[in-house]
Image (spheres, rainbow, N blue to C red):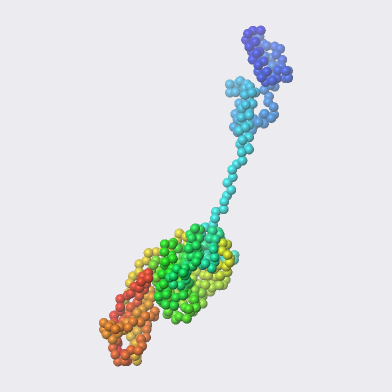
Amino acid sequence: MSRKSKKQLCRLLVTAMVLGSISTTGWHVETLAKDSGQVTQNVSATEEEATMKPESESVSEEKGTEKGTTEEEVTGESSTGETISEESSEETTEETTEETTTEETTPETTIEPTTPEPTTEEPTIKGKVKWHGKVVPGATMKGIDVSHHNGNINWKKVAKTDVDYAIIRCGYGSNYASQDDLKWKQNVKGCQDNRIPFGVYIYSYATTEAMAKSEAQHVLRLVKGLQMSFPIYYDMEDVVQLRLSAAKRKRIANTFLQIISSSGYECGIYSNKNWWTNYIPSLVEIVQSKWVAQYNTACTYNGSYDMWQCTSTEKISGISGNTDLNFWYKEIRTASYNIYKKTTVSKPKKLTIKKVKTGKKTATLQWTARKNAVAYQVQYSRYKKFKKGVKKTTTSKTIKLTKLKRRKYYYFRVRCYRYKKTSRLYSSWSKAVRKKIK
């Protein structure tokens, strides 16, 4: 046997021993081509058998292929055509299988979707505001009004309901800290923290212009620095005001509204349907926003209005007991809406006396009216420069003066005033008219 043939035989024997098949697969190394160094067909067949892999390894390799194992690793052949030893193949398979197993057994992290908390930044769509499952025609928003009578309110829970806004009582009566609503600051903070748009109301006991002025100052003290999205309302419904004349009620309301509006705030009046119809109809011409209370399935008030209070027994999550429920009919407002606007108040225009009718110890005057006038002052005197003059105040555009001296000449003049914040702003006096009393 030549040296070359021995070398080839040794190589085949080493390969067979490594594959562990020398004694079990029936190797026959009977003939070697002495001159060509080739082995017989039996050796080739046995070599083919030796390169077959168990089924379990094939499965592992298939898994490895899913991970991207190359054809070299599956067939056991290198790119050079040489057979890779089983030891090397097993190492590659184990690594591949380990990588595959890791991928299959590693649980995927799933982020559970969270339901966002409802906010009033997405207010109710017009035409979709419902009450007990039925659409409220014309309503754009649903709201509540609250005071200390509602106790400690969980505004976070309220914000998750279909309540779009709140009107908060700041207090009642004249400007005394003892008459601030006990839950005013707490309720304001609750709305601010939960982005709930809010407005304000004060319960009135005013029977004079001075008291109405004090009530306006009461509100201005409490709302200073706040951003509000809904008007400041003057709650007029107390029995003490029922006993007043219509002219006096108008003067009281006009005083409050003038002070609030000239301070830059949108304002209005709250009262029930009966009052709006029978006791304060004259306020329609001066009020910016009307809030009508009528506990019914529909508001039957004939005039226009911005807000309707429909019940006092609504159940709202976050509020224990009953709650007043309201519907808003104007534009949709969010917490970013601000009712405050810088306002310029001009001096009222000069009036003109249209007519003076004299009678026995009397004189009746009539003059041009001013829409924004809180009241009119009439002055009369027997002297041209109004020395020792007498002043009378009225909300009407006419007045009857009595107990004048007979057959004496009198001079008459008139002016009006409005409020610039809490100060009166007067017009100039009208041209004086001289008349003789009968």
Of the pair 110 and 330, the residue shown nearer to us: 110
- Camera sees residue 111: yes
Whether residue 60 sits left or right of residue 311 in the image: it is right
Of the pair 322 and 334, the residue shown nearer to us: 322
Of the pair 203 and 301, the residue shown nearer to us: 203
Q: Which residue occupies the extreme top position in the image?
A: 1
Q: How many numbered marks have been drawn onto this rendered protein structure?
A: 0
The quadrant in which the N terminus is found is top right
Q: Position of residue 76 (x, y in %)?
A: 63, 24
The quadrant in which the C terminus is found is bottom left
**Residue placed at 42% from the left, 67% from the top?**
220
Q: Is residue 99 above or below residue 414?
A: above
Whether residue 371 sits left or right of residue 333 in the image: it is left
Q: Position of residue 395 (x, y in %)?
A: 39, 79
**Residue placed at 61% from the left, 35% from the top?**
102
**Residue placed at 42% from the left, 77% from the top?**
208
- Camera sees residue 140: no
Whether residue 135 sits left or right of residue 28 in the image: it is left
Whether residue 150 sits left or right of residue 101 in the image: it is left
Q: Is residue 111 above or below residue 408?
A: above
Q: Which residue occupies the extreme front position in the image?
A: 178
Q: Position of residue 237 (x, y in %)?
A: 49, 75
**Residue placed at 53% from the left, 70% from the top?**
309
Q: Position of residue 418 (x, y in %)?
A: 36, 73
